[in-house]
Image: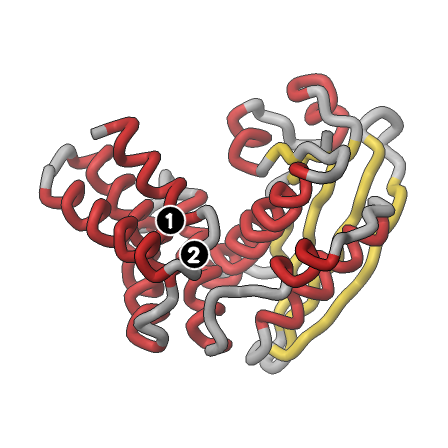
Amino acid sequence: RLAVLSPLVDGTSPELTAFADGLSATLATRLSALSQNHDLRIIDSTRVERARAADPTQAMNALGANLALQLEVQQSTQMNRVVWTLTSAQTGQALASQTLTAPVSDPFSLQDQVADGIIQALRINLRSDERAALAVHGTLIPAAEDYYLQGKGYVENSKRPDAIDNALQVLNRAIDLDPNFGRAYAERGRAYWVDYSTTKQTAWVDKARNDCSKAVSLGNAGADGHMCMGLIDAGA
C-alpha cells in the first residue's frame, strides 16, 4: 500500500501550489489504474490528509501503508522541477529518489517522467495496454493541460479560500483551449458539485450533471467522467 503525501512546494504562488496538488492527484490516479493487474494499492493525498498523516510513519500507522510517496515541486521562469521520493513507512528511510525537470510549456513530459521513474522504482513491469493508457493525457494542448492540473489541485483543496472560484476560472480556460477535453469537463463538474455542497444552490447540480455527462459522452475522460456522475448520483 502506497500513501501519496501532499506535495511540498518551493514558493508561495497559489498557482504553483495548485499545479503541484493537481500533479500529485493525477499521478495517484494514474498509479491506481495499475492496481487491477499488479500488487499495488494507492492511498491518495486526500485520504492521507483526512487521517492527519503528515509523514511516512504516520501514514503507515493511520492507513496501513508500507510505502510513502512525496513530490517537491519548484518552478523557475522557464522550467518546472520535481523531486520525488519513495520512503519506507516502517523505517522512514528513502528507498528511491529522482530529480526531474521539464519546460513549463510541457506539463506532459513532467508527468510522464515522474510516473515512469516511480513505476521503475516499484519494479512494475507494464503491459502494453497499460503503457498505452499511461501515455494518454486527454488533450494535446500543453496550456490546457496546465490549466487542468491547476484546476484539479484547487478542487482537491476546496476548503482553501476562493479555491472553487479559482478552479472554475482555470478549468474554463482549459475547455476554451480544447472544447473536447473530457477530463477538464469532469473536473469542472466536480467543482460545481463542491460548490453545491457548500451553498446548497440547486443550479450547481444541473451544471455539474451537464459537465459530467459531457465528459462521459466525449469518451476521452477515462474513468473520470463516470466517477463524476457517480458522485452526483450518490449525493443528489
Q: Quadrant of residue 5?
A: top right
Q: Three-letter amino acid code at disc 2?
A: Ala
Residue on which the image places disc 2: 221
How many marks on residues? Answer: 2
Quarter of the image with the C terminus is top left
The answer to whether the residue labelled 2 contacts the one labelled 1, judged by CB atoms less than 8 Å apart, is yes
Quarter of the image with the N terminus is top right
Q: Three-letter amino acid code at disc 1?
A: Gly
| 217 shown above or below 5 | below
Q: Quadrant of residue 100?
A: bottom right
Q: SS at mark 1?
A: helix
Viewer-proximal residue among 64 and 37? 37
Residue on which the image places disc 1: 225
Q: Position of residue 81 (x, y in %)?
A: 69, 67
Colouring method of the image: secondary structure
Residue occupying image coordinates x 70% and y 62%: 82
- Gap between marks 2 and 1 measured at Cα: 6 Å
Give the class, few, some or many, for how many residues have Cα within 10 Å of label 1's Cα (few <14, many ≥20). many
| Residue 30 horizontal side relative to residue 178, left or right | right
Q: Quadrant of residue 133?
A: bottom right
Q: SS at mark 2?
A: loop
| 40 shown above or below 137 | above
| Residue 82 horizontal side relative to residue 216, left or right | right
Q: Position of residue 41 (x, y in %)?
A: 68, 32
Viewer-proximal residue among 124 and 197? 124
Give the class, few, some or many, for how many residues have Cα within 10 Å of label 2's Cα (few <14, many ≥20). many
Residue occupying image coordinates x 54% and y 30%: 47
Residue occupying image coordinates x 34% and y 69%: 180
| Residue 130 horizontal side relative to residue 126, left or right | left
Q: Position of residue 188 (x, y in %)?
A: 31, 54
Residue occupying image coordinates x 25% and y 47%: 192
Which numbered marker is on residue 165?
none
